[in-house]
């Protein structure tokens, strides 16, 4: 892999992590997780070995399921409370 591409993917990985940790909004947290996914997949499958491709595929499928769960949970929370903020979890269903 090109060293410049590797640097860009690493910076994107750090940026996605920073966005996820510092966000107060569910959609921004989801966007940070998606940036992480898109940045780490090329790093996982950097070597063209079948095991690395398999690991990248498994990671992608797991992350897609987790992303759908985060989106569903945040939409349910917003529907019940009218709030998209992560810090405003006051409804009993949201606090589970």
Image (cartoon, grey):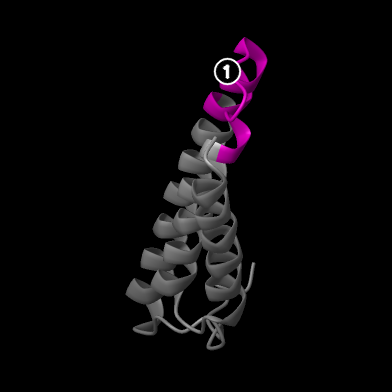
Q: Is residue 55 magenta?
A: yes
Residue in the foreground of this view, choosing between 5 and 83 = 5
Q: Is residue 55 above or below residue 72?
A: above
Tell me the quarter of the image containing the N terminus.
top right
Residue situated in front as seen by the camera: 91 or 4: 4
Asked where in the image residue 75 lies, by quadrant, the reply is: bottom left
Is residue 5 left or right of 58 when viewed as pictured?
left
Number of disc labels: 1
| Range shown magenta | 43-57
Q: In the orientation shown, which residue stands out farthest toward the front?
A: 3
Please give the name of the residue rendered at 40% of the width and 82% of the height, measured from the top-left corner: 81
Counting from the top left corner in percent of width and height, residue 39 is at 51, 50
The prevailing secondary structure element of the residues shown in magenta is helix
Q: Secondary structure at mark 1?
A: loop
Tell me if 7 is positioned left or right of 80 in this view: right
Q: Is residue 89 above or below residue 37?
A: below
The residue wearing badge 1 is 48
The picture places residue 9, in percent across and down from the top left corner, at: 53, 52
Picture coordinates of residue 28, whole percent (x, y): 43, 73
The residue at the point 62 percent across, 34 percent down is 44
Q: Quadrant of residue 94?
A: bottom right
Choose top left, top right, bottom left or bottom right for residue 27: bottom left
Q: Quadrant of the C terminus?
A: bottom right
Residue at position x 58%, y 26% in the image? 58
Return the residue nearer the eye: 7 or 85.
Answer: 7
* Crowd around label 1: few <14 · some 14–19 · many ≥20 (10 Å): few
Q: Position of residue 3 (x, y in %)?
A: 57, 46
Magenta segment includes 54: yes
């Amino acid at each position: 892999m090109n060293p410049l591409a590797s640097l860009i993917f690493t910076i994107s990985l750090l940026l996605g992590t920073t966005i996820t940790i510092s966000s107060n909004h569910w959609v921004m947290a989801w966007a940070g997780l998606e940036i992480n996914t898109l940045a780490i997949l090329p790093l996982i499958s950097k070597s063209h070995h079948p095991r690395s491709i398999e690991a990248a595929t498994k990671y992608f499928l797991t992350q897609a399921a987790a992303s759908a769960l985060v989106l569903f949970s945040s939409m349910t929370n917003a529907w019940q409370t009218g709030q998209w903020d992560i810090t405003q979890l006051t409804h009993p269903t949201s606090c589970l």
